[in-house]
Amino acid sequence: MMARRVSALLVLLLVLALLLDPVSAGGGGVCPAESCRECVTLGCGWVGNDLQCTKKGLFGFGKGVTTVVTQCTPLRDALVRLADNSPALSAKLVATYDFIREKITVK
C-alpha cells in the first residue's frame, strides 16, 4: 500500500517537472530549418504564424503548427514573409488565404 503511494507521488512529481520546464522536456526549443518541409523532415514542428521551426513538445502542438509534410503551405509562408516589405498587405493576404483554405478544406 505504501509503495503505491510513493509510486503515485513520484509520477505526479515527474509530470509537474515536465510541465514546469517544457524546454528541457523537448518542447519550446528551436530546430535549425528555414522551410516547413525541411523542419518537418527533421522531426520538428513548423509554426506558420511566425515561420519558426520548434522542437516537438511532450503534449503536441497548438493550432497553426504543422507536423506533416503534406500540411506545409509554401504560398502562405511567402505571404507571411511579405510582411518585411508590406505588413498591411501581408496581413490581408494571409487572412484571405486562411479564410479560403478553411472553406475548401474538408474536416
Image (cartoon, grey):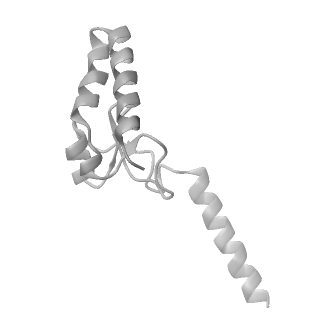
Q: Image height check: is 55 above or below 79?
A: below
Q: Image height check: is 35 above or below 17?
A: above
Q: What is the number of callouts on the image?
A: 0
- The image shows residue 14 at horizontal and vertical percentages of 61, 66
Identify the residue at horizontal 30%, vertical 45% (top origin): 31
Q: Residue furthest right?
A: 1
Identify the residue at horizontal 42%, vertical 40% (top origin): 64
Identify the residue at horizontal 29%, vertical 13% (top origin): 84
- The image shows residue 26 at horizontal and vertical percentages of 43, 55
- The image shows residue 25 at horizontal and vertical percentages of 48, 57
Q: Residue furthest bottom?
A: 1
Q: Image height check: is 37 above or below 52?
A: below
Answer with left or right where residue 52 lies relative to residue 18.
left
Identify the residue at horizontal 79%, vertical 91% (top origin): 1
Answer with left or right where residue 107 lies relative to residue 40.
right
Which is more toward the observer, 71 or 36?
71
